Image (cartoon, grey):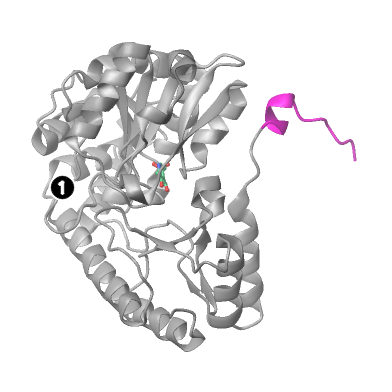
């Protein structure tokens, strides 16, 4: 069989670190082990019924069987603008400040193609969501890492970025509530971000994937609530986590019109927009009762309480996350994140994500997803207790 050579841009793509983890977990499952998989970020609950019903009805509409408008239906862009006004008191022009995406992941990779040339610099959080690296690699640009440290509440310290790097940087990725650290942003931090971006003409891309998930009565803030934010960048929102719609592939880019126009232009050449019935169901999710979202956040909060209290009781010195559905847990000194994750899988059949997979600064941590029920999380705590790992 002829083997065709891949283009250089494919060789530039970063290694998929977590593919190996999935393989290891499957190996234990195939061997008949009862693995508690806390390593992934896939929401475990179904999409709410009223959203599915909306899709079912819309699927019978012949108007939706044709090509959708290239840039998406206006009713969906209007729905996201209404959602942002209602949830964050942010005003968006649906035509010029909203782009419909095939999920947030696609937008994060596209934005690098829109603004980075070969050799340009993008600022990236470390640890961070690996898809930022993918888009930057395809564009031939270079990453400068911004460490997210516990002592800074997992916010980057802009003072630590050398002046010449700040000046050269074209894009900056941020993500709060944060995957993997579960850190949350503050209004002063976002104000500093706008200042840095304005002084250095950096385009800020705030990934708000976990925007709906805040605990202890604290609603996560949108970057676009910050004065001046729309002049300096965009936010990327997704339906995946807020409405358990990860398989539906609906996301949005919101904010600076010149950035939105660049994304729309690129997408004109790659896609026709999403199936109209999916767009209709997404609008239903955004506009109708948000009770399902409140229930979801409550569920994650109860899981967090069970899990974190359980870990603290067995002597693991961990902090309760304030947002996202992740726990970012420090590994005992004698381990790396990989050796600790291997030990948990091997001895307790618990899968966690080693922090190194999110960047060098993650190597003292493992990430746990609260994506299984409380009984299973309690079982994980019980198994960990048997290992006698903590003093
Ligand atoms: C931080 C972060 N950003 C973006 C995404 C992408 O979400 P989607 O492509 O499903 O919209 C995820 C998904 O796990 C994520 O964790």
In depth, the one of 100 and 380 nearer the eye is 380
In the orientation shown, which residue stands out farthest toward the right? 1
Residue 276 point in image, percent of width and height: 33, 33
Question: Helix, strand, or loop for circle 1?
Answer: loop
In depth, the one of 63 and 379 nearer the eye is 379
Provide the residue designation for mark 1. Answer: 219
Q: Residue at x 25, y 41 (%)?
A: 185
Image quadrant holding the C terminus, namely bottom left
Image quadrant holding the N terminus, namely top right
In the orientation shown, which residue stands out farthest toward the bottom? 386
Q: Is residue 144 above or below residue 25?
A: above
Q: Residue at x 51, y 38 (%)?
A: 131
Q: Quadrant of ligand 1?
A: top left
> Most prominent secondary structure in the magenta stretch?
loop
In magenta, the rendered stretch is 1-12
Q: Residue at x 52, y 66 (%)?
A: 333
Residue 359 visible: no
């Amino acid at each position: 069989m002829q083997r065709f050579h891949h283009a250089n841009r494919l060789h530039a793509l970063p290694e998929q670190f977590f593919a190996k983890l999935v393989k290891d977990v499957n190996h234990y499952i195939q061997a008949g082990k009862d693995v508690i998989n806390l390593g992934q970020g896939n929401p475990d609950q179904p999409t709410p019924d009223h959203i599915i019903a909306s899709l079912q009805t819309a699927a019978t509409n012949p108007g939706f069987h044709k090509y959708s408008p290239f840039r998406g239906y206006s009713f969906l862009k209007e729905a996201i603008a209404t959602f942002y006004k209602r949830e964050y008191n942010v005003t968006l022009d649906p035509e010029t400040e909203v782009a419909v995406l095939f999920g947030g992941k696609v937008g994060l990779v596209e934005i690098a193609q829109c603004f980075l040339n070969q050799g340009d610099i993008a600022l990236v959080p470390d640890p961070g969501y690996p898809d930022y690296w993918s888009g930057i690699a395809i564009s031939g640009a270079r990453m400068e890492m911004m460490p997210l440290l516990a002592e800074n509440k997992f916010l980057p310290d802009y003072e630590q970025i050398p002046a010449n790097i700040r000046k050269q940087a074209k894009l900056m990725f941020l993500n709060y509530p944060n995957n993997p650290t579960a850190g949350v942003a503050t209004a002063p931090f976002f104000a500093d971000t706008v200042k840095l971006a304005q002084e250095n003409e950096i385009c800020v891309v705030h990934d708000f994937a976990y925007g709906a998930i805040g605990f202890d009565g604290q609603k996560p803030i949108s970057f676009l609530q910050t004065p001046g934010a729309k002049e300096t960048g965009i936010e990327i929102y997704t339906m995946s986590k807020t409405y358990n719609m990860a398989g539906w592939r609906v996301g949005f880019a919101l904010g600076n019109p010149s950035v939105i126009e660049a994304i729309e232009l690129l997408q004109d050449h790659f896609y026709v927009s999403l199936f109209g019935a999916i767009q209709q169901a997404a609008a239903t999710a955004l506009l109708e009762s948000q009770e399902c979202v409140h229930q979801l956040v409550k569920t994650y909060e109860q899981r967090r309480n069970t899990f974190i209290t359980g870990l603290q009781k067995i002597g693991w010195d961990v902090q309760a996350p304030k947002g996202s559905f992740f726990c970012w847990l420090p590994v005992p000194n004698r381990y790396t994140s990989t050796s600790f994750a291997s030990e948990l899988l091997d001895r307790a059949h618990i899968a966690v994500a080693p922090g190194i997979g999110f960047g060098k600064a993650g190597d003292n941590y493992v990430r746990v997803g609260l994506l299984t029920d409380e009984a299973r999380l309690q079982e994980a705590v019980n198994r960990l207790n048997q290992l006698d790992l903590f003093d």
